[in-house]
Amino acid sequence: MSRPLIFLLCFLALSVLFAVIGVVHYWASFNGSEIAFNWASGILTGVVAGGIIYVIPEIKTYIFLRKFQSIFGKYSWKNKLRLAIPAHTISNVVPGEDKYHAHCDATARRYISEVMISKQTDICFLDSDQNVGTTDFSYISFGGHNLTVKLIQDSNYYDNTRKDRFKKKGSSKEFICNNPIGYDYGIIIKHHAPNNHKIIWICVAGLGIYGTTGAAWFLANRWEDLYKKFSDKDFEVIVKVDAGKDDSATICE
């Protein structure tokens, strides 16, 4: 049973209870049976109070889920949210930098998959870098996946002349990874499909490995901050994260 239907039934039940109280009050006053009215009104008041106690947590849960779905979308077992990581994360990894990229992409996906599972969101994994051909489905992509690259290229922070920084179009402000000092930058982008508002595309990436994991942690654990700022609208945000401290991620643009 859906929550809106539960609320409707509770509302109807409370309406009936108040109507019964009114009828009992009229009957008691007409027949002079004040004791009967007191008993009946006491019982009905208790039932009403119990109903209210039950409904309030349901309303809070419903509002919370509506906020969550405003950011990530609403899914079912027939229409699952896809989590996409680059092929190097699941293939044989050669020694070197790719190993760290594979680890950070897997960590980023873990942050998101854990929060999705906790909210009973239906998800599946898109473990491929191959061009999907069509993106008529909702996804969250990580790191260097082709879907991530596409969203970044379509964003306001893409600079085809420099790959080592985020720079907003029309602005001189730049965000440059500086690991020796101990911080990194990540980006979180959310766009709705142009022809279908129910389809949501989200990507998480960083200039370095900490930018990716920090941005994913922020999306998974601080999504309510994004809701307060953007509600269900598209957004593009830059987060700054201390090296090795994903939970230090904060919005800086």
Image (cartoon, rainbow, N blue to C red):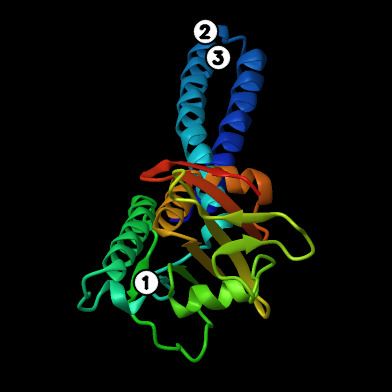
Q: Nearer the viewer, residue 125 or 175?
A: 175
Q: Amino acid at mark 1?
A: Ile
Above or below for 216 versus 101:
above
Q: Which residue is mark 2?
A: 35
Left or right, 40 with respect to 93, comes to right
Q: Amino acid at mark 2?
A: Ile
Q: CA distance from mark 2 to mark 1?
A: 70 Å
Label 1 residue SS: loop
Q: Which mark is residue 37?
A: 3
Can residue 69 be seen here? The reply is: no
Q: Which mark is residue 85?
A: 1
Above or below for 32 versus 144:
above
Q: Where is residue 233 shown, x and y percent of the image?
A: 68, 59
- Asked if labels 2 and 3 touch by Cβ distance under 8 angstroms, the answer is yes
Disc 2: CA contacts within 10 A as few (<14), some (14-19) or many (>=20): few
Disc 1: CA contacts within 10 A as few (<14), some (14-19) or many (>=20): many
Left or right, 222 with respect to 119, comes to right
Left or right, 42 with respect to 24, comes to left
- Asked if labels 1 and 2 touch by Cβ distance under 8 angstroms, the answer is no
Mark 2 vs 1, N-terminal side: 2
